[in-house]
Each structure stands twice: as C-alpha cells, then as structure tokens.
Amino acid sequence: MKTMYILLFFGMGAWALYEQTQPHPNIWVQIIAVVIFFYGMMKLMEKVPGKNQEKEEEDV
C-alpha cells in the first residue's frame, strides 16, 4: 500500500512538472497536483520518528 502511495504522489509531482512545459499550462492542474503531492509526503513522513525524539524522552 505504501509503495502505491509513493508512486501516486511522485506521479502527481511529475504531472505538475510536465504541465509546466506546455505552451499554455493549466494553473489549476498544477495547484491540485502540488497539493496532492505535498499531502502525500506529509502522510508518508508522519511515520518517521523525529530526530530529537530520544533526547526528549531522556529529559522527562
């Protein structure tokens, strides 16, 4: 499932970049693709532990 999300989100990023190369790019397509890409990155990265998480637990 995670692999499917990764492919989908990078596909949206590529689609937004491809749309920029058109003579008359559709701004709404770019906005939607970038928003979906960043939302996907947020969802994928929320599972990665923070860099200072162990230090914060030791301080408590």
Image: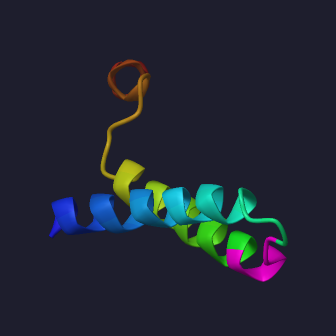
Residue 60 visible, this orientation: no
Q: Quadrant of residue 50?
A: top left
Count of labels in the image: 0
**Residue at 35% of width from left, 68% of height from top?**
8
Which one is nearer the viewer's eye here, 21 or 47?
A: 21
**Residue at 74% of width from left, 72% of height from top?**
31
Q: Establish if 41 lies above or below 57.
A: below
Could you say where residue 36 lies in the image, as x and y percent from the top left? 55, 71
Q: Quadrant of residue 20?
A: bottom right
Q: On the rendered image, what quadrant is the N terminus found in?
A: bottom left
**Residue at 40% of width from left, 49% of height from top?**
45
> Is-magenta flag for residue 42?
no
Q: Left or right: where does residue 18 sit relative to residue 56?
A: right
Residue 22 visible, this orientation: yes
Q: Quadrant of residue 28?
A: bottom right
Could you say where residue 35 lies in the image, as x and y percent from the top left? 64, 69
Q: Left or right: where does residue 53 sit relative to residue 19?
A: left
Provide the residue span drawn in magenta: 25-29
Q: Left or right: where does residue 6 sit relative to residue 36?
A: left
**Residue at 46% of width from left, 55% of height from top?**
41
Q: Establish if 9 lies above or below 27.
A: above
